[in-house]
Amino acid sequence: MREPEHRPARTVAMLALVGLLAGVIVAAAVFPLAAASGLAAKASAQSFDQLPADFTVVQAPQATQVFAADGKTLVATFFDENRRDVDLAEVSPLMTKALVAAEDKNFYRHNGVDMGGLIRAAVVNQASGTQQGGSTLTMQLVRMLATYSATDPQQVIDATEKNAARKLREAKQAIALDRKLGKDGVLERYLNMAPFGHSTYGVYAASQFYFGTQPKRLDLAQAALLAAIIRGPGDYDPLDVTKRQAALDRRNWVLDHMVTTKAITQAEATAAKAEALKITGRAPSNGCTAAKPNDWGFFCDYFRRWWLDQEAFGNTAYDRERRLDGGGYRVVTTLDPKVQAAARKRVGEQIGTGATNAIMLAAVEPGTGRVRALATNRVFGVDDPAHPRNKPHSDPAKAAEGVRGTYPVTSNPLMTGGGGVTGYQAGSTFKMFTMVAALEKGYPLSYPIDAPKVYRSGFPAPQGAPGSCTDIPRYCPTNDSPGMAGPADMWSAFGRSVNTYFVPLEERVGVPAVIDAAKRLGVEFLSPQDRARADDPDAAASWGAFTLGVTAITPLDLADAYATLAADGMHCAPTPVQEIVEESGQKLDVAGPRCDRAVTPEVARAAIDAARCPVGDRSAFGKCHGSTAGGVAGVVAHPVAGKTGTTDSHRTASLVVTTRQLAVAGIMGDPDWPGATVDTSHNVVNPAVYETLADAMKGQPREDFPAPRRDAVSGTTTRIPDVICVSVQNATDTLREAGFTVAVSPDRVPSRCATGEVAGTDPGGQTIAGGAVRLILSSGAAAAPRSGPTAPASPVGPPPRRLVPRPRGR
């Protein structure tokens, strides 16, 4: 229908008429005895002129839709009010005709205010004591806009209060709104804001909820029913069996009025009345617990937690949540349905949802940080206390108190951390951080250490503590098997996971440098205790077991760290989003990758070259000798790098593997009781991880890892000066003048030198320029043979009497 032109003279006349009639309306409604008084009418007209006509046309809350990486598959919807705005062109003309017939048949013949209707309502109200509205569609829209723009409860009350003053204010603002938006604009706003019951707002959500269709496909009977519901969603609820007939009667009433307004013919109305009422009543899912498939809920929750941390969406978590639930965003996440399906399938093949242990798996894309999958053998949701599904807590003390565990149902962020989840020990996967720190300091991949069966380190450890010797309060790790002792370089030591190579290497590099490398590669240190120690240089310096993975880490951080190395050292913060579009169509840059240079490409390439050994791939120089998961490369069928990790008493078992295109990390353990002694197995977690990667890589192009430069392989070493049988001070001065850093071992070993003199150095012979050298002092006992200019690299002396290794280090 064509809109009438808005002529200025007509608008001015209408305002004058409203002002004049306002006195009559107010007098009749508020001052009955003075209704005939010209003074009352004049005063009311003056008050009307002083009412504000301008106001803010706000955007009503919109549902945010979250999609998978394909931009089509819906992951979840977030809303306080289920609403999605549509253009009027996307709404069936039958819907607008039904609305006009039901709510404002003179809509196209007034300028926002139907004076006849207002006066008629005022007279009837005065005579009968009832409350007829007399409001036009435009005045109703003014009321809705005032409610949504309210900043405090009193403004909401003022916007809905039933009195003549509110009517007058609405009337003046309706005239201004009609002029500002035009008829089509008023209809579009109204149809997008109106409530339709069952937490459904706007014609789009109503069409979906009641009929499972788009607004533009509404037929006559459907449009009439929606127009009927608007008058009173609680009174005309077609889903309520006690109100279904009232809804049908109101629908038919709307059809009759559409005939009266000549919107339809009598025959069309009769046919529509004969249609059976078919209601779907299917509301869209709201939030992560309704995500389908269920395992997508863990990724959905990760997205939601990420959103609430982004200052771009508000100053507080409350503000950000309101934006998520009402901002009308279209979010395309990084979730790859193919990778997610593979991950959940492979986890499920190895372990059931009701098991105490969990495999927690994360997949990250190198070079972007995009999280492609999060999977575990749990059902995402909240257990019902009235009908609990979860089993007793795995911690006997908590089970005795009646506390239930989080299996099979949980909403805890097991893979990503947060909400009290700080991660799990990942064992020897942490040796990577020592190797990176060593490479940065100039130690080459070929750097030799004669790894002993027992390494008596300089790190303190209370006697009786795990990994300590009983004869001295120091950290003395061993290997997973005695046969791992002997000469090794980074390739062989990383491939076979030799603890007594990496602890002395960590000692020479310095634990703070190792921790710094871990942080740059993406380790967050979510455990407060671990973070406090990592941030304290003095405490960090004595953390000898750090290289063996005794700190907590999430599968997401572990995958992120190895993905950084696969991306030539470019760290990209893990992200669940790749595109966020506002309701206006504006894209937000908060969804873009956030990357920085963590390590140089050469260090990253060298570290990856050694990391090809544990998983059975070939280094660029053919230097691999031994592996802990040698079958991985054959299954993945792409160039691959990675590392296994095991903690003492099999508390956890881990595997992280990466190609150039995707990194996948999995940790197996008891998330309810991480310190428990549980029977985890690489035979369970490993296949879940590498089969997931293999599935994801099918059809992907083969991309080899770039080979490192020769200097990262062979490096440059320099001779350590001969300081045998000299004083500690003289040896220290000599070594420092040569550019080395010096430390003194607390061990004393038998030698021909006098007591307190230097019996040897660790390392002996050669090391990198500026490297760390530890002086080993003589006990002055029986003479010991010398080997070259210095004593052997490992201290000479009796082995410790008893060792308690932790972690296992594979």
Image (spheres, helix red, strand yellow):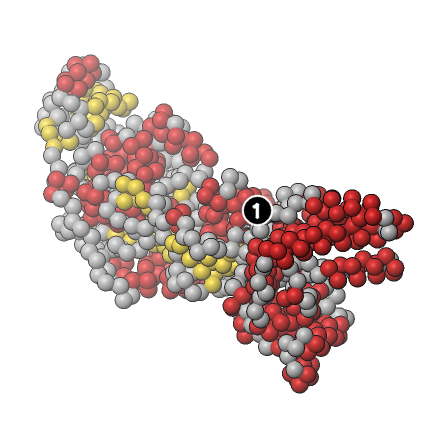
Q: Position of residue 483 (x, y in %)?
A: 24, 45
Q: Secondary structure at mark 1?
A: helix
Question: In the rendered view, would you say 530 is above or below 743?
Answer: below
Question: In the rendered view, would you say 438 is above or below 217?
Answer: above
In the image, is 726 to the left or to the right of 378? left
Question: In the rendered view, would you say 515 is above or below 617?
Answer: above
Residue found at the far front of this picture? 9
Front in this rendered view, residue 110 or 397: 110
In the image, is 621 to the left or to the right of 79? left
Q: Residue at x 36, y 25 (%)?
A: 538
Q: Residue at x 14, y 18 (%)?
A: 737
Front in this rendered view, residue 173 or 665: 173
Q: Residue at x 16, y 46 (%)?
A: 708
Q: Residue at x 18, y 24 (%)?
A: 740
State the image quarter where residue 375 is shown.
bottom left
Circle 1: residue type = Pro
Question: In the rendered view, would you say 751 is above or below 319?
Answer: above
Q: Position of residue 701 (x, y in %)?
A: 23, 63
Q: Position of residue 786 (x, y in %)?
A: 12, 26
Q: Position of residue 161 (x, y in %)?
A: 75, 50
State the image quarter where residue 738 is shown.
top left
Q: Which residue is mark 1?
A: 396
Does residue 391 appear anywhere in the picture?
Answer: no
In the image, is 471 to the left or to the right of 220? left
Front in this rendered view, residue 749 or 459: 459
